[in-house]
Amino acid sequence: MVKSEAGSAGRAFVVVLLVLAVLTLATAVVYLLSDLNHRNYRIATHESNLVIEQGRFFPVGFKRFEPSTDDLKASYAPIPLPPNVSIGRTEVFNDRADLDRAVFVLLASWARERLDSREPGDFELATSYISRCELLPGLSEEQRIEMKTLRADLAFKNGRRILGEVVNQLKKALGEFETAYKLGTSRPQDVDQWIADVQRRIRDYQNAGVSIAQPEAPPEPGLETPPDTPNVEQPVTPQDDDTNPPKWRL
């Protein structure tokens, strides 16, 4: 009887040890799977934004990536999607450098498309995408070279936009000079000179393909369109007094 009870106790102890061993092994497996999943990243969309997700500390599932430093928070903040563009969940990346390179491919392609667009707001979107690309820390050397090219193209487009604004301002100035001519300014020779000079500059910019940045403001009520003024080929020497405006160059 005593031997039977001792044998039963021994078997129970062995069973307990086996159960504990299985539980320990299962816990270790779950922990390892959770750690592996926590190292994963993917690209997703949420409320018209591109967002970066990180694996939960669990064998499955993802959540919004929340970096611990301010620099990384700026790098991986949500990015507005272009109008009428959507992306599905991409592949899972187990290295953040691979994630950065995949994000760069998306942003760089969106930026290029909008640098060549004339739609309102597209230039600003392209600027924001290029700025976000510059924050990604894991770009390859080839992508960093491509980034410099994108930044150069952005500067070129911005320069043309500024020239477009210059043309717009020149047209406004031309309208003021023509109004002065129509109303009978006391300085007709100077007005002729300025009109000829401004007309030449506008032609030069427009011949170079510079478009007006904004539509012209409508004429003031009650003012008729001034008549065409003579196209002065040789500028007339301004009157010799101290009130003459200086000759300007852009």
Image (cartoon, rainbow, N blue to C red):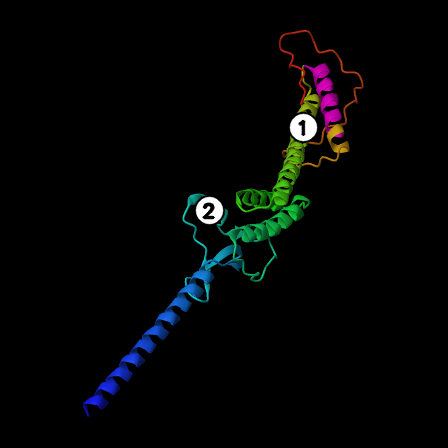
Q: Is residue 15 left or right of residue 47?
A: left
- Residue sitting at x 43%, y 53%: 66
* Residue with the mark numbered 1: 170
Q: Is residue 189 magenta?
A: yes
Q: Earlier in the sequence, mark 1 or mark 2?
A: 2
Residue 35 visible to the viewer = yes
**Magenta span main SS:** helix
Instruction: Depth check: give the residue in front, 153 or 100.
Output: 100
Numbered range of the magenta stretch: 187-203
- Disc 1 and disc 2 in contact, CB within 8 angstroms: no
Q: Position of residue 47 (x, y in %)?
A: 50, 58
How far apart are the alpha carbons under marks 1 and 2?
Answer: 45 Å
Q: Position of residue 71 (x, y in %)?
A: 45, 43
Please name the amino acid that badge 2 sits on.
Leu
Element under disc 1: helix
Instruction: Depth check: give the residue in front, 98 or 182.
Output: 98
- Residue sitting at x 66%, y 46%: 112
Which quadrant of the figure contains the C terminus? top right
* Residue with the mark numbered 2: 72
> Relative to 98, is 202 above or below?
above
Q: Is residue 100 left or right of residue 245?
A: left
- Residue sitting at x 29%, y 84%: 11
Please name the amino acid that badge 1 sits on.
Leu
